[in-house]
Image: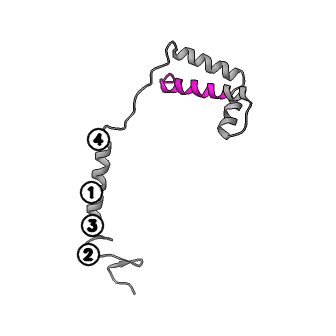
Amino acid sequence: MTSENEIQGVAVSRAGVGARPGASVLAAAFLAILVAGCAGGGGGDPGARPLPSGETCQSLRGQLDRLLARGVQPKVEALSAGRSLSAKDRADAEAYNRILNQYLGARCHL
């Protein structure tokens, strides 16, 4: 037979359910660290990167579209999967990745 202070095999103390003396201190410390990390301001978004000299978002988009029209997408996927490519295919895939990084870094997609 179970006592009044025991529910489904879990002992309940009069101080509280499963109360541990240091639990509230640990919770408070965790919350303080979390709030301090969010309020720090450091390590945030660095902002948009400048475009290379003479480039615009439209010119980068045009270069990406031309490479896609030439069928670069499977080459990029093969490169990222580590499969071997010819020198020309590797150069096309690397050019696409470089231009895409510039395009996204400058936040042209927003």
Left or right of 45 on screen, residue 89: right
Q: Examine the structure image and report whether residue 100 is included in the region drawn in magenta.
A: yes
Residue occupied by mark 4: 39
Find numbered disc 3 in the image and state the secondary structure of the residue it sits on: loop
Question: Which class describes the residues within 10 Å of circle 2: few (<14), some (14-19), or many (20+)?
Answer: few
Magenta range is 92-110
Q: Quadrant of the N terminus?
A: bottom left
Distance between mark 2 and mark 3 Cα atoms? 17 Å
The residue tagged 1 is: 28
Q: Would you call the spot at circle 4 few (<14 residues within 10 Å), some (14-19), or many (20 or more)?
A: few
> Pointers 2 and 4 in contact (CB under 8 A)?
no
- Amino acid residing under circle 3: Gly
Is the magenta region chiefly helix, strand or loop? helix
Residue drawn at 66 percent across, 18 percent down:
66
Tell me the residue that label 2 is attached to.
Answer: 14
* Residue position for label 3: 22
Image quadrant assignment for residue 82:
top right
- Give the CA distance from mark 4 to mark 3: 26 Å
Residue at (26%, 75%) from the top-left corner? 14
Cα separation, mark 3 vs mark 1, equals: 10 Å
Distance between mark 2 and mark 1 Cα atoms: 23 Å
Question: Is the Cβ of the residue at disc 4 closer than 8 Å to that at disc 3?
Answer: no
Q: Camera-side residue: 13 or 2?
A: 13
Q: Is residue 33 placed above or below 14 in the rendered structure?
A: above
Q: Are marks 2 and 1 in contact (CB under 8 Å)?
A: no
Q: Compared to 8, does 57 lie above or below?
A: above
Label 3: few (<14), some or many (≥20) within 10 Å? few
Which marked residue is nearer to the observer: mark 2 or mark 1? 1
